């Protein structure tokens, strides 16, 4: 298997997760309004953390696929 440029690109899942986190964090529309103390901010934090974790998992899977294809090429 040849290591193509397509394998080196950033996964769409990671890009979309980060974009969603940025838009959600900047958006005045929330699942729970921020006027409710603590709980209003907590939902923002949970959504942002979940998006970051999803991006990290997507990047990890891509890196794993690249390493696997590199190992197969060297054999």
Image: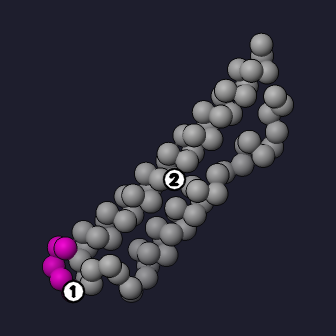
* Extreme residue toward the left, this view: 37
Lateral position of residue 13 relative to residue 66, left or right: left
> Can you say which quadrant of the picture contains the N terminus?
top right
Which numbered tag is attached to residue 18?
none
Q: Are marks 1 and 2 in contact (CB under 8 Å)?
A: no
Examine the image and state in which quarter residue 48 appears.
Answer: bottom left
Query: Residue 36 in magenta?
Result: yes
Lateral position of residue 42 relative to residue 3, left or right: left
Label 2 residue SS: helix
Question: What is the image's colouring?
Answer: one colour
- Mark 2 lies on residue: 55
What secondary structure prevails in the magenta region?
loop
- Mark 1 lies on residue: 35
Q: Position of residue 24 (x, y in %)?
A: 44, 75
Total number of numbered labels?
A: 2
Measured along the vertical axis of the image, is residue 1 above or below residue 44?
above
Question: Which residue sits at x=21%, y=86%?
Answer: 35
Residue span colored magenta: 35-39
Q: Position of residue 4 (x, y in %)?
A: 82, 39
Mark 1 nearby-residue class (10 Å; few <14, some 14–19, many ≥20): few
Examine the image and state in which quarter residue 74 appears.
Answer: top right
Lateral position of residue 37 relative to residue 62, left or right: left
Question: Which residue sits at x=74%, y=21%?
Answer: 72
C-alpha span from label 1 to label 2: 29 Å
> Can you say which quadrant of the picture contains the C terminus?
top right
């Amino acid at each position: 298997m040849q290591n193509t440029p397509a394998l080196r690109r950033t996964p769409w899942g990671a890009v979309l997760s980060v974009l969603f986190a940025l838009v959600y964090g900047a958006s005045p529309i929330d699942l729970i309004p921020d006027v409710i103390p603590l709980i209003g901010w907590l939902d923002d934090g949970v959504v942002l953390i979940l998006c970051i974790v999803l991006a990290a998992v997507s990047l990890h899977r891509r890196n794993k696929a690249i390493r696997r294809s590199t190992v197969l090429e060297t054999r």
